[in-house]
Amino acid sequence: MDSVEQREFHEFVSARSPAFIRLAYLLTAGDQHAAEDLLQTSLAKTALKWSRIDDPDSYLRQVMYRQQISWWRRRREYAVPELPERADADATHDIELKIVVQKALGMLTAKQRAVLVLRYFEDHSESTVAAILGCSIGTVRSTAHRALARLLQLCPELHDLYTRSKASP
């Protein structure tokens, strides 16, 4: 990588890191250290190919999704964290719901989290998600359906929010 490419890469990382660390945080089910590792590893892989990349945002996003799934496949561990106990009566419902959702996301597979993040957080079409993850549109549909069903099972508090979002145009 020459000095011009190094400067471009550094500017890209400086400008886009906050968005990508949020994405990594979601993909790792709220594990800040794993999110930082995921982003760092993905940036290193992106830097190696920098001179050949046309769309750095898309490329880095795809590397992150695939890296997270690769790590998950290697570990084959399924997190089964306990639901948090209510600390006190002053805890707000929103904070409690966030914790429960975070724990529930941690119980989904990496692929399920990736599909949900791409479809509903980043608002990509099914065909775009399929292209990013290297699978069929049918796989994206079925994975999203199963992931949402599992999320609603693990976090019943989301049921009202989910049914309201489906009812609105």
Image: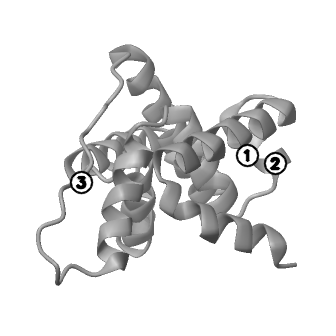
In-image side of 161 versus 16 (left or right): right
Label 1 to label 3: alpha-carbon separation: 24 Å
Q: In which quadrant is the C terminus drawn?
A: bottom right
Q: Secondary structure at mark 1?
A: helix
Is residue 107 visible in the rendered image? The answer is yes
For residue 122, what is the image quadrant? bottom right
Q: Is residue 104 rendered to the left or right of residue 158? A: left
Look at the image and name its color scheme: one colour
**Upstream in sequence: badge 1 or badge 3:** 3
Residue 7 showing in the rendered view: no
Which residue does the image show at 58% across and 59% down from the upper left? 57
User: In x, y percent, where is residue 54?
Assistant: 67, 54
Which mark is on residue 126? Answer: 2
**Would residue 72 appear left or right of 132 to someone viewing this image?**
left
Q: Amino acid at mark 2?
A: Glu
Q: Amino acid at mark 3?
A: Gln
Name the residue nearer the viewer: 102 or 124.
102
Are dots 2 and 1 in contact, CB under 8 Å? yes
Figure label count? 3
